């Protein structure tokens, strides 16, 4: 499955990427939290919280995980380099698996190195300050960050695997992450405010966007650590959010398999060109804007200032739709298939938004707000 010679070649040729990601990990999860202790915790009796700092800085490691597959896979976005790599003595299956094993090694290793550096520097700071959590509780944050980083890698990897060019890959990354974020928001706005659930079940909506779970959990964990409430059983949220992350991980492993199948079938003559495959750039782009139109539709026809803002948002989104599509196509042209996608996105999105508002907000009362 793994081509060992190719893996060795990747380590030799891309070792600067490994070093850069490792340095970013140490700075993000180690040095930045250490610098912030003096500034943020002096007011609280010289107490420090490493987990609270992770809430603000772990997102940089998510960005690293997004960039790594884009960097590795970029060799297929040039016709000359793609011909060279596809002619190596290995098949596409070996190339895909080897490259992604290498990419996962980079993001996992850089996260581990950064986290251990963070613990070491926090230990040094603990000589002068008071830690609101124990080192064991700090270690419990590690699997949360690791899984979130791996999920981010898989999401980006799926985007780049079904793309023919760098522009399409970037557009697909934006679309995929945007779709997941908006699905999260739709569940919050239209579904969860109408379902009476205990507060600690908030993480159920997080299944749609795994990278967002740590930020929410770390903030809650810090509050509980300061009050000691995690000892009363409310810390059950940790286990449930870990399960949500694992479900999210399984979902994106499935999508990665689909990306693998698509990579096997990508036409060599299309690599590095504006010729896009089915269910890739234009379709992901239309789905992304379709969800935006759902939000716009949910506030349309209220005959108020909000309605005027919704119309402006509708026009702005439509302009953004075509401008970004022209960038994706690398030409200004109103193609028939693009007009059909636009019609489906705007009409379908607005109708769904209006329907969701009527059936889930106006028709039925809110049972329990989870804000």
Image (cartoon, rainbow, N blue to C red):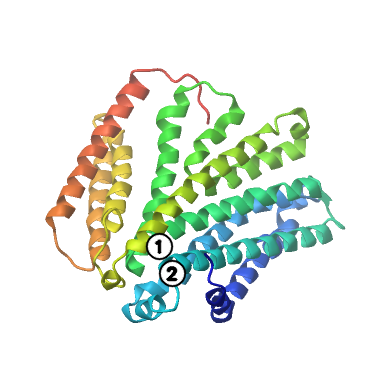
- Above or below: residue 247 compared with residue 334: above
Q: Do the numbered discs 2 and 1 sit on residues whose CB atoms are within 8 Å?
A: yes
Q: Looking at the image, can residue 159 be seen?
A: yes
Q: Which secondary structure, mark 1?
A: helix
- 85 or 123: nearer the viewer: 85
- Above or below: residue 294 compared with residue 191: below
Left or right of residue 177, residue 213 in this image: right
Number of the label disc, if any, that sits on residue 187:
none
Q: Looking at the image, can residue 173 be seen?
A: no
Residue 17: x %, y % from top left: 56, 74
Q: Which residue is mark 2?
A: 73
Residue at left offset 43%, top offset 45%:
180
Left or right of residue 76, residue 131 in this image: right
Residue 362: x %, y % from top left: 34, 21
Q: Residue 333, located in which quarter of the rendered image?
A: bottom left
Q: Residue 225, located in which quarter of the rendered image?
A: top right
Residue at left offset 38%, top offset 57%:
261
Q: Which secondary structure, mark 2?
A: helix
Residue 106: x %, y % from top left: 59, 67
Q: Which residue is mark 1?
A: 160
Q: Residue 83, located in which quarter of the rendered image?
A: bottom left
Residue 324: x %, y % from top left: 27, 59
- Mark 2: give few (<14), some (14-19) or many (20+) Cα within 10 Å: many
């Amino acid at each position: 499955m793994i081509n060992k010679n190719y893996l060795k070649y990747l380590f030799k040729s891309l070792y600067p990427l490994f070093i850069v990601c490792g340095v970013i990990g140490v700075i993000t999860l180690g040095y930045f939290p250490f610098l912030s202790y003096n500034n943020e915790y002096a007011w609280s009796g010289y107490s420090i919280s490493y987990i609270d700092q992770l809430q603000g800085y772990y997102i940089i490691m998510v960005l690293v995980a997004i960039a790594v597959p884009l960097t590795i896979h970029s060799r297929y976005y040039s016709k000359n380099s793609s011909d060279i790599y596809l002619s190596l003595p290995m098949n596409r299956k070996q190339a895909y698996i080897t490259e992604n094993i290498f990419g996962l090694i980079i993001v996992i290793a850089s996260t581990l190195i950064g986290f251990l550096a963070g613990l070491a520097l926090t230990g040094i700071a603990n000589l002068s300050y008071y830690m609101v959590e124990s080192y064991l509780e700090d270690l419990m944050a590690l699997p949360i960050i690791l899984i979130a980083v791996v999920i981010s890698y898989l999401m980006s990897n799926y985007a780049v695997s079904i793309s023919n060019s760098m522009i399409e890959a970037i557009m697909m990354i934006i679309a995929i992450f945007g779709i997941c974020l908006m699905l999260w928001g739709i569940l919050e706005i239209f579904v969860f405010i109408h379902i009476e659930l205990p507060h600690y079940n908030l993480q159920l909506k997080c299944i749609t966007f795994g990278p967002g779970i740590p930020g929410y959990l770390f903030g809650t964990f810090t509050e509980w650590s300061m009050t000691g409430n995690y000892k009363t059983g409310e810390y059950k949220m940790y286990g449930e959010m870990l399960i949500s992350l694992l479900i999210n991980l399984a979902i994106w492993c499935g999508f990665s398999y689909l990306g693998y199948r698509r990579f096997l079938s990508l036409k060599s003559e299309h690599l590095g060109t504006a010729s896009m495959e089915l269910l890739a750039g234009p379709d992901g782009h239309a789905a992304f804007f379709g969800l935006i139109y759902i939000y716009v539709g949910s506030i349309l026809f209220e005959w108020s200032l909000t309605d005027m803002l919704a119309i402006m948002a509708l026009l702005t989104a439509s302009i953004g739709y075509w401008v970004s599509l022209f960038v994706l196509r690398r030409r200004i042209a109103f193609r028939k298939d693009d007009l059909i996608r636009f019609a489906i996105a705007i009409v379908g999105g607005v109708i769904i938004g209006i329907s969701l508002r009527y059936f889930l907000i106006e028709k039925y009362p809110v049972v329990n707000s989870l804000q």
